[in-house]
Image (cartoon, rainbow, N blue to C red):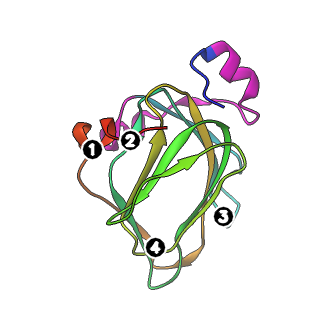
Amino acid sequence: MKVTDQKVFNIMNMFGTGAENSAYAQYFDGISYLQPLVDGTSPIFMANVTFEPGCRNHWHIHHAEQGGGQILLCTAGEGWYQEEGKEAVSLKPGSVIVIPPEVKHWHGAKKDSWFSHVAVEVPGVNCSNEWCEAVSQEAYEKLNG
């Protein structure tokens, strides 16, 4: 369900919006928020990531020599996920996306909805994240749904 009203969305956003994601703002178009779900002692990083309408991260790749990748558990609002060379996938609460390592992709909100997902970083050997170019406004505007 698309949600344009932030107050309504905040009620639906079960893990909370968290603080503005200023540490990674350079890799996002629009404003995102980060609510860590585990403390620094956990072997797995998990956080609720919230995107304002129209916000999306840049193309990026999760590198790993073994294991690695990311899992997205969509919890509120509506968004998009796209792998390089493939059509974008519409995301709604309950959508689960498994992103293998070495796959270039992006994800974020639809232009007319707030969106949240829990991001789970899959443990691996020598994991790193490579940030690439922004999703072009032209390509983003062509997405319907």
Q: Amino acid at mark 1?
A: Ala
* Mark-to-mark CA distance, 4 and 2: 31 Å
Q: Are marks 2 and 1 in contact (CB under 8 Å)?
A: yes
Quarter of the picture containing the N terminus is top right
3 or 4: tag closer to the N-terminus: 3
Q: For numbered disc 3, what is the local secondary structure?
A: loop
Q: For numbered disc 2, what is the local secondary structure?
A: loop
2 or 3: tag closer to the N-terminus: 3
Q: Amino acid at mark 2?
A: Leu
Q: Residues within 10 Å of mark 2 (few under 14, many from 20)?
A: some
**123 or 80: which is nearer to us?**
80
Q: For numbered disc 1, what is the local secondary structure?
A: helix
Number of the label disc, if any, that sits on residue 127 = 4
> Where residue 65 sits: x, y (%)?
44, 85
Q: Residue at x 66, y 13 (%)?
A: 7
> Where residue 90 sits: x, y (%)?
53, 47
Query: From the viewer's perspective, is residue 97 above or below residue 122?
Result: above
3 or 1: tag closer to the N-terminus: 3
Q: Residue at x 33, y 64 (%)?
A: 84
* Mark-to-mark CA distance, 3 and 4: 12 Å
Number of the label disc, if any, that sits on residue 139 = 1
Q: Amino acid at mark 3?
A: Ile
Number of the label disc, if any, that sits on residue 44 = 3
Q: Amino acid at mark 4?
A: Cys
4 or 2: tag closer to the N-terminus: 4
* Mark-to-mark CA distance, 2 and 1: 7 Å
Q: What's drawn in magenta, residue-wise?
A: 7-30
Q: Residue under label 2, please give it.
A: 143
